[in-house]
């Protein structure tokens, strides 16, 4: 199995440290608003990764975090906490906001038929562990105190710039006028924020005799260390996390424990909508409620995502989503053939699909292999189960055999056509169509499909 590793900037053979088990971490959502279609591409791609790892015989011990505190609007160390912003917008408490949007996220996660992580961890459940990690960093001389928080001194971590290929001299030269004068280096970041006089922050905890809250990057470092230990196999997230969030996670964990944080890093690219950046001001922020209003399911969207590659920038449009919906319908109708004809040996197709997935998660190539056999071959139950194991599109579940009554009507219609009783044949066809079934007539009978 080969994967593109952000750490080395090349495709490499993947081998886990444990021959049977893969330790994997996924950066989860900040639950301050409804997740939109751009947010969920990441989780669909990483579900494909988990499924491919499983196809190769590995057990995946996967952790996903839920950010419910500490993620400031700048993604760095200034601005308002996104949870506070969401609470003010909704007229609710931050705790109510976190619960509401976390539940919405998980509901959509499951509707997409994504494999449940081994552990789903809320940031606020790891505050005491956060403090312990801060203590370790402080004892190693990596931190310094300012009026607004404890900061990581990146000059004490010589390889800080390597992961993201940062030009620290350029960053320093381009620092804003309002750059925090207490920071020793422009790249330094807060591991713990203090509550300052006059500041109203709903989520806060006592630490070293003062009230405060953890920095955003700290939660992932803490959860990884607590749940997966030192040196994991794969860390996943979006490309926007590379220069700040993931760089800072590396600094925290490798600075604290002196061991490589992760052997592989996978990052998915952005999507645009109709060629534009996703933005509320442009009115192109769509969530799954919007898709449902237009007649599209979670699995239609999942098919659209899987038709592309996690490293490619994608453009979302409802025209392309409609094409993905049709493709998924084609797969369902392919699966329905197994109730009507003798199966073909598709073991070579299965091998070809796995080969494509093992080539840096090339799901588009895998679908191309499947498309080659749609019209001239018939799957068996095991092949359809394999497709669902590989892609999680619920093909087996959504293609049940039709009732004996419908089968009888299909046979009667075929006989009526042979007898040239077209009125009866058309009436039976219309009855069958009301059940969401269409017929394709052949020389020796009719094949039924989903409409």
Image: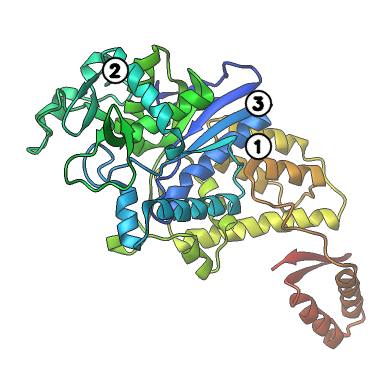
- Asked whether the beta carbons under mark 1 and mark 3 sit within 8 Å of each other, the answer is no
SS at circle 2 = helix
Q: Residue at x 75, y 44 (%)?
A: 385
Label 3–label 2 contact, CB within 8 A: no
Query: Which residue was labeled with disc 3?
Result: 58
| Cα–Cα span, label 1 and label 3 | 18 Å
| Residue located 83% across and 65% down the image | 402
Residue shown at 52% from the left, 41% from the top: 45
Name the secondary structure under disc 1. Answer: helix
* Residue 235 falls left or right of residue 367: left
Q: Earlier in the sequence, mark 1 or mark 3?
A: 3
CA distance separating discs 3 and 2? 38 Å
Residue 211 found in image quarter: top left
> In this rendering, is residue 171 above or below 338?
above
Residue at figure coordinates x 43%, y 59% from the top left: 317
Return the x and y of residue 172 as percentages of the image width and height: 13, 27
Q: Which residue is mark 2?
A: 138
Q: Is residue 179 visible?
A: yes
Q: The residue tagged with tag 3: helix, strand or loop?
A: loop
* Residue 184, quarter of the rendered image: top left
Front residue of 157/52: it is 157
* Quadrant into which the C terminus falls: bottom right
Relative depth, front residue between 101 and 201:
201
438 vs 302: above or below: below
Res. 353 mark: 1
Between the residue at mark 2 and the residue at mark 1, the CA separation in whole angstroms equals 50 Å
- Residue 1 seen by the camera: no
Above or below residue 389? Residue 8 is: above
Q: Nearer the viewer, mark 3 or mark 2?
A: 2
């Amino acid at each position: 199995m080969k994967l593109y590793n952000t750490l080395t900037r090349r495709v490499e053979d993947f081998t886990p440290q444990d021959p049977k088990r893969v330790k994997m971490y996924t950066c989860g959502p900040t639950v301050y608003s409804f997740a939109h279609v751009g947010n969920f591409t990441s989780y669909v791609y990483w579900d494909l990764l988990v499924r491919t790892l499983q196809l190769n015989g590995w057990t995946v011990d996967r952790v996903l975090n839920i950010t419910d505190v500490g993620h400031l609007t700048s993604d760095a160390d200034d601005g308002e906490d996104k949870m506070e912003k969401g609470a003010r917008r909704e007229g609710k408490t931050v705790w109510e906001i976190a619960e509401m949007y976390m539940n919405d996220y998980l509901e959509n996660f499951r509707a997409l038929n994504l494999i449940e992580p081994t552990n789903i961890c809320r940031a606020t459940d790891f505050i005491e562990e956060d403090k312990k990690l801060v203590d370790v960093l402080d004892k190693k001389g990596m931190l310094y105190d300012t009026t607004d928080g404890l900061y990581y001194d990146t000059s004490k971590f010589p390889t800080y710039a390597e992961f993201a290929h940062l030009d620290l001299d350029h960053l320093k030269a381009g620092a804003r006028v309002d750059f925090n004068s207490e920071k020793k280096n422009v790249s330094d970041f807060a591991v713990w924020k203090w509550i300052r006089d006059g500041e109203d922050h709903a989520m806060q905890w006592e630490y070293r005799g003062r009230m405060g809250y953890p920095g955003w990057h700290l939660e992932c470092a803490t959860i990884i260390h607590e749940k997966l230990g030192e040196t994991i196999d794969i860390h996943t997230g979006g490309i926007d996390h590379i220069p700040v969030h993931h760089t800072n996670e590396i600094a925290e964990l490798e600075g604290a424990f002196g061991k490589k944080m992760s052997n592989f890093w996978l990052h998915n690219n952005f999507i645009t909508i109709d060629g534009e950046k996703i933005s509320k001001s442009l009115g192109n922020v769509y969530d799954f409620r919007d898709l449902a209003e237009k007649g599209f399911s979670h699995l239609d969207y999942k098919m659209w995502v899987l038709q592309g590659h996690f490293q490619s920038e994608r453009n979302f449009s409802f025209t392309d989503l409609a094409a993905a919906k049709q493709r998924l319908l084609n797969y369902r109708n392919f699966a329905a053939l197994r109730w009507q004809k003798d199966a073909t040996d598709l073991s070579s197709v299965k091998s070809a699909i796995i080969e494509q997935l093992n080539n840096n998660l090339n799901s588009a190539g895998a679908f191309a292999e499947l498309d080659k056999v749609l019209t001239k071959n018939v799957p068996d139950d095991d092949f359809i189960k394999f497709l669902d194991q590989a892609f999680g599109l619920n093909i087996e579940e959504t293609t049940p055999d039709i009732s004996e009554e419908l089968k009888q009507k299909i046979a009667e219609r075929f006989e009526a056509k042979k007898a040239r009783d077209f009125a009866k044949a058309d009436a039976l066809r219309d009855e069958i169509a009301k059940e969401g079934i269409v017929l394709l007539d052949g020389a020796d009978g009719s094949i039924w499909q989903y409409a």
